[in-house]
Amino acid sequence: MSDGTTSSRVSRLLQNVANVGIIIVVIALLSVLIRDRIRTAMPPEPPVIKAGDSLGSLLTDYHGPRARHLVLALSATCHFCSDSAPFYRRLVMSAVEHGSADRLIAVFSQPPEVGKAYLNQWDIKITNVVQADYSQLNVVATPTLILVKSDGKVERVWVGKLTPDLEREVIALIS
């Protein structure tokens, strides 16, 4: 009698272990299928501007034997841009002191008049204001600051509101 009870317990134990194993395999397969489904359903990430890229025709009027240019991709509706206004004023003042104010270019996705009004609102005296399609520049967020060499190739990129150390770095590079 004890042999029958023991064998039935062993049989139930093996059955339970097999069931748990099947459940684990099914969960693993479902997680792989769901992960792959999510991956294919998500749109690809847009390209992001980086060092070595070219800004194309945006800087055609600004090329030449000069040193670097600093492109500020801003938006009149961006609160990070507005939060950074004191830094942009310091940047312009430093550039004016060093004779490099004409190397600052403010780019807006909105019409130039909107960009100029926005800059005036914050007392930011950038004279070069242009409109551009950010997707063609691979700019995915504002503010984006792009340091461009005289040949039109991107040297450095900063995205978002900068720390005080990064602000000093940008000012030093454009002055």
Image: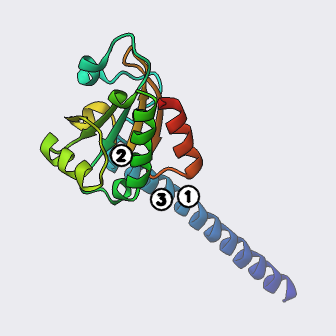
Mark nearest the camera among 1 and 2 is 2
Three-letter amino acid code of the residue under disc 3: Leu
Secondary structure of the residue carrying tag 3 is helix
Q: Which residue is mark 3?
A: 30
Residue closer to the observer: 9 or 19: 19
| Gap between marks 3 and 2 measured at Cα | 15 Å
Q: Which residue is mark 1?
A: 28
| Residue 149 position in % (x across, y down) | 43, 20
Image disc number at residue 44: none
Residue 161 showing in the rendered view:
yes
Secondary structure of the residue carrying tag 1 is helix
Image-based side of 4 in relation to 102, left or right:
right
Tell me if label 3 and label 1 are in contact, CB under 8 Å. yes
**In the image, what residue occupies the spot 21% across and 42% down?**
109
In the rendered image, the vertical position of residue 159 relative to residue 97, given as above or below? below
The quarter of the picture where the N terminus appears is bottom right
User: Where, by quadrant of the figure, is residue 69 drawn?
Assistant: top left
Q: Which residue is mark 2?
A: 40
Pointer 1: residues within 10 angstroms few (<14), some, or many (20+)?
few
**In the image, what residue occupies the spot 54% across and 52% down?**
163
**In the image, what residue occupies the spot 41% across and 41% down?**
93
| Gap between marks 3 and 1 measured at Cα | 5 Å
User: Where, by quadrant of the figure, is residue 45 drawn?
Assistant: top left
Residue closer to the observer: 169 or 153: 169
Residue closer to the observer: 41 or 100: 100
Pointer 2: residues within 10 angstroms few (<14), some, or many (20+)?
few
Mark nearest the camera among 3 and 2 is 2
Q: Residue furthest bottom?
A: 1
